[in-house]
Image (cartoon, rainbow, N blue to C red):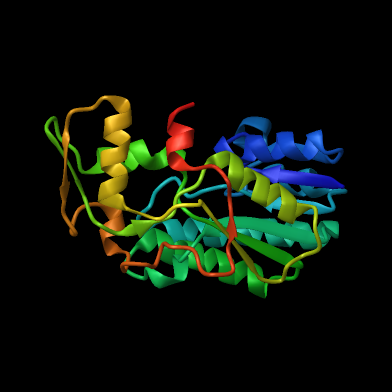
């Protein structure tokens, strides 16, 4: 298959491209650095010419009220070009439980992205993944000072980006789901506990304080970010990933 991976130079996209090419497909990474920009439309028709599948792994540059406009513009651009090019399958990466956290503007924006794809002219698949191991340090930094890290007890089921990329690659070469595939890590943690595990592994002596008003994930209902029963469970555990 010929697969256009937009956002193909980022954390997930670069791994998806490598996996697809390693399994005999022709995957091409596209991004503003390669002259393809979904926001402006630059290079998009050319990138999708001849493609069997388009995978959209781009992300809004902000998590605030500007994010819905980003996803509306980029999805409209992608779907218009994909339909004109005769692309037979469009894939996006979303978030487990995204439709259960309406208090977060970014999550509402991702729901909008999903809805635009569902209503569009191209057969589609949505991969919903849980939070990435690679982003845990950033989550801790949002509510940290030199002595403490404040985190809610929101339950999360994080996974390695390599496992996310594998899930996206697998869906991309299959028939369009016309629905959602949920993927998640093998363990559920309260976020404050995950913070303690992370700091201990890093030799960081700061104290994690449980604060159910702290940070973005405080807005998530208790189990909203935990994978549903039909999820595909990845094999890499957090402690195993930390030890690498």
Q: Is residue 8 visible?
A: no
Write down the quadrant of residue 122 in the picture. bottom right
**On screen, 163 above or below 110?**
above
**On screen, 239 above or below 194?**
above
Image side of residue 75 versus residue 155, left or right: right
Count the labels in the image: 0
Instruction: Choose between 239 and 218: the one closer to the eye.
Output: 239
User: x and y percent of residue 60 in the render?
Assistant: 47, 50
Q: Is residue 13 visible?
A: yes
Image side of residue 98 versus residue 174, left or right: left
Q: Residue furthest bottom?
A: 119
Q: Residue furthest left?
A: 147
Instruction: Choose between 243 and 216: the one closer to the eye.
Output: 243
Instruction: Choose between 142 and 36: the one closer to the eye.
Output: 142
**On screen, 12 above or below 227?**
above
User: x and y percent of residue 234 in the render?
Assistant: 58, 50
The residue that appears at 31% across and 69% down in the rendered structure is 221
The residue that appears at 68% across and 40% down in the rendered structure is 16
The residue that appears at 80% across and 34% down in the rendered structure is 22
Instruction: Choose between 118 and 172: the one closer to the eye.
Output: 172
User: x and y percent of residue 6 in the render?
Assistant: 66, 44
**On screen, 2 above or below 85?**
above
Image side of residue 153 versus residue 40, left or right: left
């Amino acid at each position: 298959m010929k697969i256009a991976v937009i956002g193909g130079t980022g954390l997930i996209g670069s791994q998806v491209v490598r996996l697809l090419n390693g399994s005999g497909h022709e995957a091409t990474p596209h991004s503003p650095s390669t002259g393809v920009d979904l926001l402006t439309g630059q290079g998009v028709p050319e990138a999708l010419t001849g493609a069997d599948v388009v995978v959209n792994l781009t992300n809004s540059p902000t998590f605030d009220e500007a994010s819905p406009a980003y996803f509306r513009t980029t999805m409209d651009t992608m779907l218009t070009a994909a339909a004109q090019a005769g692309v037979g399958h469009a894939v996006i990466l979303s978030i487990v439980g995204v439709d259960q956290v309406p208090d977060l503007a970014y999550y509402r924006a991702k729901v909008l992205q999903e809805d635009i794809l569902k209503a569009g002219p191209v057969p589609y698949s949505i991969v919903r993944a849980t939070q990435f191991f690679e982003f845990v340090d950033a989550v801790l930094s949002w509510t940290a000072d030199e002595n403490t890290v404040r985190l809610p007890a929101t339950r999360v089921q994080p996974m390695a980006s390599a496992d996310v990329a594998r899930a996206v690659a697998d869906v991309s070469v299959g028939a369009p789901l016309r629905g959602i595939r949920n993927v998640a890590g093998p363990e559920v943690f309260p976020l404050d506990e995950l913070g303690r595990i992370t700091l201990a592994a890093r030799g960081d002596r700061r104290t994690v304080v449980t604060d159910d008003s702290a940070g973005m994930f405080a807005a998530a209902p208790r189990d909203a970010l935990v994978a549903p029963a039909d999820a595909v469970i990845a094999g890499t555990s957090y402690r195993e990933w930390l030890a690498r």
